[in-house]
Amino acid sequence: MKIAMLVDSHYPNKDGVVDAIDLLRGELAKRGHQVLLIAPDPGKGKRMDGVHYIPAMRVDAIGYFLPIFPSDSIFEIKDADVDVINIQGFGFMAVRGIATGKLLKKPVVLSFHTPVWDFVADYSPLPADISVNFTWTYFRRLFKWADLSVAQTPSIAKELFDNGVKPDDIRIIPTGIDTETFRPGNDGTVIRERHNIVNKKVIIHVGRLSPEKQMDVLLNAFTKMDDDTVLMIVGRGALEKELKDLTASLGLNDKVIFTGFVPDEELPLHYAAADAAVSSSVYEAQCLAIMNAMAAGLPVACTNGRAFVDFIRDGENGYLYEPSPEGCAEAMKKCLSAPDTMRTDARRTAEEYSIPRSVDAYISLYEEAIAKKKR
């Protein structure tokens, strides 16, 4: 099967969506399928082999590249004679993918990752209510144009329906987890030694440092944690300086470590160096970082809402808390004293979301979309 995959973001950006795309693309290639990846151009010196790029401009306010310029992507897709177009995103590339599918009479699958309505007002120059209303109007049209749509969790699908988005056909396919790379038994000693936290209790947070992650809640929660507990924040983002300033103002410099960007090969070791993982975000569509932590056998503390309630059973494979510093601190303390059965249950949950299962579902969906288009 030949698949054209149009993505809103790719390398050098690094986030859960980029990871999800690469996991799907890699497993499809292993199974003998051909994937034509089309992404916004990050510029000379940052391109990757095997990717077709569309001219784009970097928008510093969001840290991403927007493909607003004309391109020959339609000819690339036509010449490749693809069987199906899979849009992995919602922005300019989604519009290109829909238009290309209509012109070439190819089936279009829309994979939705990001509930952008939660934070669009943080980046838009328009008033918040106008930005949000425009976003929902756009999504109501976008999903109608796709032949088949994908949501990562039931919670996101319900939220779309509740706001008037009525796809012709939508399926739930979670992002696949690399349960071979992220697993119990990895040795994180080198990471603990690097940061001089050998004898500390370590809680890890992995993700972009951006407004929607609500990191201020987490940092305020950490003022309530014992002195022998440290927070290891893995990732970079627009709020890095602001969060470091907040850390200092709260007197947490000795209890919070900012690792910055961590290469893929070291990320499993960072999870292995931790005793538990935490998310303070209330916007996650699935949260690959938390599922990787569960695959590594870590107890997790997550906000009680949206996608987390789809796979975390409070007190069994993790802990859910109401979004407040007090609730977050209590949940993190529970993680540090969690029984071994929780680690086993967390791992078992992650295995249910493995890459092979996810790709099996995608292949079946592609085949269905192709058959539907022929009919």
Image: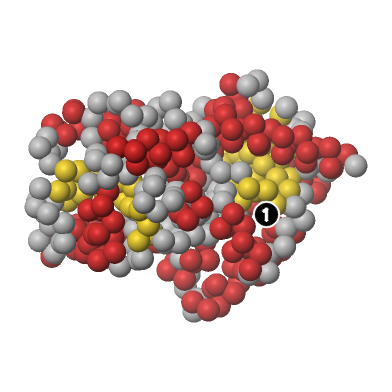
Q: Which of 33 and 47 is in front in this view?
A: 33
- For image coordinates 48% across by 48% down, the residue present is 311
Q: Which residue lies furthest to the right in this view?
A: 375
Circle 1 residue: 95
- Report crowding for label 1: few under 14, some 14 to 19, many 20 or more residues within 10 A (C-alpha): some
Locate residue 34, reporting x and y percent.
66, 26
Locate residue 95, reporting x and y percent.
67, 54
Locate residue 356, reporting x and y percent.
57, 29
The N terminus sits in image quarter: top right
- For image coordinates 30% across by 37% down, the residue present is 340
Dividing the picture into quarters, in which one does residue 77 lie?
top right
- Number of callouts in the render? 1
Q: Is residue 10 left or right of residue 72?
A: left
Residue 315 shows up from this direction? yes
Task: Identify the image's colour scheme: rainbow, by chain, secondary structure or one colour.
Answer: secondary structure
The C terminus sits in image quarter: top right
Give SS at disc 1.
Answer: helix
Q: Nearer the viewer, residue 57 or 173?
A: 173
Q: Is residue 111 above or below residue 164?
A: above
Q: In this view, does 186 lie above or below 245?
A: above
Residue 261 shows up from this direction? no
Locate residue 302, reporting x and y percent.
37, 55
- For image coordinates 12% across by 57% down, the residue present is 252
Q: Nearer the viewer, residue 322 or 115?
A: 322
Dividing the picture into quarters, in which one does residue 91 lie?
bottom right
- For image coordinates 52% across by 36% down, the residue present is 352
Q: Is residue 352 left or right of residue 166?
A: left
Q: Which of 186 and 375 is in front in this view?
A: 186
Q: In this view, does 34 lie to the left or right of 270?
A: right
Q: Is residue 83 above or below residue 69?
A: above
- Give amino acid for label 1: Val
